[in-house]
């Protein structure tokens, strides 16, 4: 176990050391060659490439972490943990042109883990969050309707924190796929490539992740509108 | 087309994998054969469980047209599944929105503070020295604590 990073603010890095493999490059990608150079430098262990990574992507990623965690210190810790984790895992990253999507997921995961710890949120098992069925194929418990329209829900900014906290409670393999497919908006094949899993597995996990998130949101959004 | 051939072709029909000519033959047979039409109707019945299994493909428009019609027919008669599909779509939208930039953030600087860059680089060097088995790197600066 490595000691705490120099900033030493007590962050944990255990949960977001995720497997990262190949990713399919997009056909049109600006500055792809510059990203290739960056990745090559990182893979060679070049400290100046790491500094470039921090300076080029750090601002946007810090904003992302800040959005999830709500304060500067926690966001800075999460970013540091995430970027060090990314550097350790760079040998497994073979896609040249999706550096931001790759970093995005690592930062979101690091931030969500910190949020979960801070709020003492327990991870849920996926089985407890999926719909149950009777022998005749009907749902054991009738789903509750969400009376507010999609537009009304999206206009309620305070729901964003609630949704993030519930995403943080999903088991990691479902959370990972949900973050890439629905949040970073990678397609199924890109997500499969990045995580080194089958396309069919991505589809199953994203579906279960959404179902589980829906179950977690149900008590807040079904029944009478606020 | 014989009834046995019709039976064998049902799966291809449901997958939307038939050519126009094949489909025309298939449709002509079922319009004249109540037993085969009945068999097809039974194959096209969907339980709530099956609907939920394919919901991801449905909302992402990845279903073959005939499968989509079967799906829609189930939704016409099952208000519970309508509620579920609605909540599922809203969940996807809320998940996306949860990580979007907000108004507060757009007013904040987009650059990473230099102090934080230095702290991260220091941490990286310390980690590198440690993994190389060398002496512990001394922190060059204690940051904001």
Image (spheres, rainbow, N blue to C red):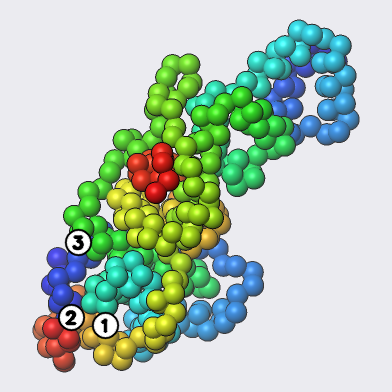
Position of B14 compared to B134: left or right?
right
Tell me whether circle 1 and circle 2 mark residues in contact (CB < 8 Å): yes
Taking depth in this image into account, of A126 and A149 the one nearest to the observer is: A149
Q: Determine the residue positioned at 48% across, 60% down.
A: A155
Q: Which mark is residue A44?
A: none
Measuring from the top left, give residue A119's x and y in whole percent: 21, 58
| Label 1: element kind | helix
Q: Determine the residue positioned at 48% across, 22% down.
A: A138
Q: Which mark is residue B120?
A: 1
Measuring from the top left, give residue B22's x and y in whole percent: 84, 27
Q: CA distance from mark 2 to mark 3?
A: 18 Å
Tell me whether circle 2 and circle 3 mark residues in contact (CB < 8 Å): no
Asked if residue A27 shows in the view, the reply is yes
| Label 2: element kind | loop
Task: Judge whether A135 appears above or below A22 on screen.
Answer: above
Q: CA distance from mark 1 to mark 3?
A: 22 Å
Q: Which mark is residue A118?
A: 3
Q: Determine the residue positioned at 41% across, 68% down.
A: A104
Q: Quadrant of the N terminus of chain A?
A: bottom left
| Callouts 1 and 2 on one subunit | no
Q: CA distance from mark 1 to mark 2?
A: 8 Å
Residue that label 2 marks:
A7
Taking depth in this image into account, of A142 and A224 the one nearest to the observer is: A224
């Amino acid at each position: 176990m490595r000691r705490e990073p120099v900033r030493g603010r007590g962050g944990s890095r255990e949960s977001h050391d995720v497997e990262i493999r190949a990713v399919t490059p997009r056909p049109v990608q600006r500055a792809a060659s510059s990203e290739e150079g960056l990745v090559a430098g990182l893979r060679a262990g070049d400290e100046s490439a790491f500094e470039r990574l921090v300076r080029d992507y750090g601002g946007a990623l810090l904003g992302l972490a800040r959005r999830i965690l709500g304060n500067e210190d926690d966001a800075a810790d999460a970013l540091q943990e995430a970027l060090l984790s990314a550097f350790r895992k760079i040998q497994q990253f073979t896609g040249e042109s999706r550096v931001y999507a790759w970093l995005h997921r690592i930062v979101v995961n690091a931030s969500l883990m910190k949020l979960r710890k801070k709020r003492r949120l327990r991870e849920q098992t996926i089985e407890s969050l999926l719909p149950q069925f009777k022998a005749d194929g009907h749902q054991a418990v009738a789903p509750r309707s969400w009376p507010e329209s999609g537009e009304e829900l999206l206009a309620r900014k305070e729901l964003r924190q609630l949704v993030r906290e519930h995403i943080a409670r999903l088991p990691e393999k479902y959370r990972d796929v949900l973050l890439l497919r629905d949040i970073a908006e990678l397609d199924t094949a890109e997500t499969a490539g990045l995580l080194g899993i089958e396309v069919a597995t991505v589809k199953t996990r994203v579906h279960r992740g959404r179902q589980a998130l829906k179950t977690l949101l149900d008590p807040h959004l079904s029944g009478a509108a606020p | 087309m014989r009834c046995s051939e019709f039976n064998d072709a049902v799966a291809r029909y449901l997958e939307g994998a038939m050519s126009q000519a094949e489909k025309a033959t298939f449709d002509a047979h079922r319009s004249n054969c109540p037993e085969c039409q009945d068999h097809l109707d039974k194959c096209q019945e969907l339980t709530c469980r099956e609907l939920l299994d394919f919901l991801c493909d449905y909302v992402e428009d990845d279903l073959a047209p005939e499968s989509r019609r079967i799906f829609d027919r189930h939704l016409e008669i099952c208000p519970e599944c309508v509620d579920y599909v609605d909540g599922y779509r809203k969940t996807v939208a809320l998940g996306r929105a949860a990580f979007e930039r907000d108004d507060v953030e757009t007013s904040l600087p987009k650059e990473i503070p230099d102090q934080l860059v230095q702290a991260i680089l220091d941490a990286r060097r310390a980690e590198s020295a440690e993994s190389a088995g060398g002496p512990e790197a001394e922190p060059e600066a204690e940051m904001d604590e």
